[in-house]
Structure formats: structure tokens, C-alpha cells
Amino acid sequence: MSNIRIIRIHNELLGTYGDQGNAEVLAFRAKFHGIAATITDVTYEQSIPRNGNIYLLGGAEDSAQLLSLEALRRENNLQEAIADGAVLLAVCAGFQIIGQSFWANGAKVEGLGLLDVESNPGGKKRCVGEVKARCSILNLELNGFENHSGTTTLGSSAQAFAKVSSGYGNGDGKSDGAVLGNVFGTYMHGPILARNPQLADLLLTRATARPFSQIEDPLASSYASIARKY
Ligand code: GLN
């Protein structure tokens, strides 16, 4: 693969928590690995390209989350691309959207069903703060920042993305996110790929079916090591 196509979905709606930076990190690291990368922003009005290699959904307030879901429901391009092996990273509101159902603005809505998880209204207390969670796929403790009111339970066929060591994650302080094949859901903002560049390399590996040797990016390493302290 000579060019990796990164599709950033509804950044104007799902950009509240800085998750748009995940696309920049992927493109930067792809270039480090000698692969050209293009970032395509898809807005609420536009159709989602079918030929992406990595798709990204970010976090948002409930109303923006509902608008994004409405647009995603107009077509099956994302689901078809995933079925063909494309990679999806969905953060917080995005993670809830790709589950079976979630609550927004006091009502339960059906999600895209790409992951067997259900999100429900949390208690009065929002889950806010630093989160650390061990990802068994990478054999690494990841870290991020969370800010959500919804909590998520894993269905019988769902596998947690990471095991929480501090923070709330899915709300129970035990698991964070869910993963199925190349579909990754998590509550970790940061952006997560800036704080954990190894995860960016995993997504690139999955998208290109090509293993990458470790690269040293001093700025990424110092950011990750500062973030790990909190
Ligand atoms: N609106 C959702 C919630 O509060 C998602 C928030 C987010 O994306 N940070 O649970």
C-alpha cells in the first residue's frame, strides 16, 4: 500500500474533546514509516467514502452525537468498509454510537451495532479525569483523559479494549472500551494516539498488513512519559 487513506468522520460534530488529533498522529507516523497518508474530512452533509483504510470517530456532547448518528444511518458505507477489513477507532461518543444502543438527551437510541456493547445513563457524577488501562493486544498500559456521563456494559460477545488500573473507563473502573477485529472503541481522549503512539502503529499495522519497526519520535516520547505520571 503506497498511500493510506484516513477518514475523519464528522469532525465538526465529534471534535469537542480534541480527538481530531488522532488523524494527524496517524498521518505523521505513517510518513515516518515511509507511507504517504491523506486525511479526508467527511462532514454531516457528505457521504462517507467507501475506500478508506482507517476511519475515526471522536467524542461530543449528546446533541452533536445524535446528529452524527443520524448522518451515519443514511448509508452503510462505514459498515461495508469495516466488513472489508478497514480499521475503525471510535472514542467516547463515537464508541457509544457504534454500540448496540446508548442514551442521549434523556432518550435511548439504537446504535450502529458494530460492537456488542450497550451504553446507559450514568449516575449524577460524570466520569472525568485521567485514566490508565492495560491493553492486552499491545501488552502496554495506555493512558488518556475521560469525560463522559454514559457508562457502558459489554455484551456476551464483547471483549474489553483495556483493563482499567485507574479512572472509570466503561464506568465500573474495571474495563475500558471494546474491540472486535479491527474495530476499536474506547473512552480515552488525549488524543489517545498522541499519548500512546504504539496504538497508532498498531492501527497502521492492521490497515496495511505490514509490521513496522519501532521509530523514535522524541516529542511523542516526552508527551507520553509526562502523561503517564498523572
Ligand atoms: N455524550 C456522551 C456522554 O456524556 C459522550 C461524551 C464524550 O464523548 N466525551 O456520555
Image (cartoon, rainbow, N blue to C red):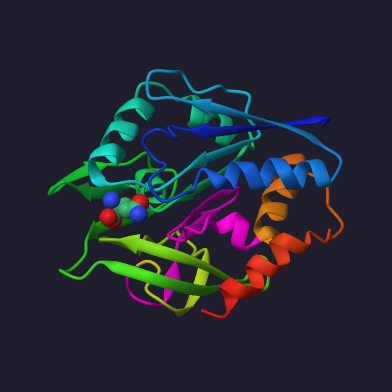
Tell me what residue is drawn at x 63 percent, y 62 percent. Answer: 196
Figure quadrant of residue 197: bottom right
Q: Where is residue 64 shown, x and y percent of the image?
A: 29, 38
Q: Where is residue 71 shown, x and y percent of the image?
A: 34, 26
- Would residue 47 be found to the left or right of residue 222 on screen? left
Give the farthest residue toward the top: 46
Q: Where is residue 33 shown, x and y percent of the image?
A: 84, 46
- Would residue 11 be found to the left or right of residue 89 on screen? left
Q: Is 96 placed above or below 153 here?
A: above
Tell me what residue is drawn at x 57 percent, y 72 percent. Answer: 227
Residue range corresponding to the magenta coloring: 171-196
Tell me what residue is drawn at x 12 percent, y 49 percent. Answer: 106
Q: Nearer the viewer, residue 4 or 113?
A: 4
| Membership of 173 in magenta stretch | yes
Tell me what residue is drawn at x 34 percent, y 33 percent. Answer: 68
| Membership of 8 in magenta stretch | no
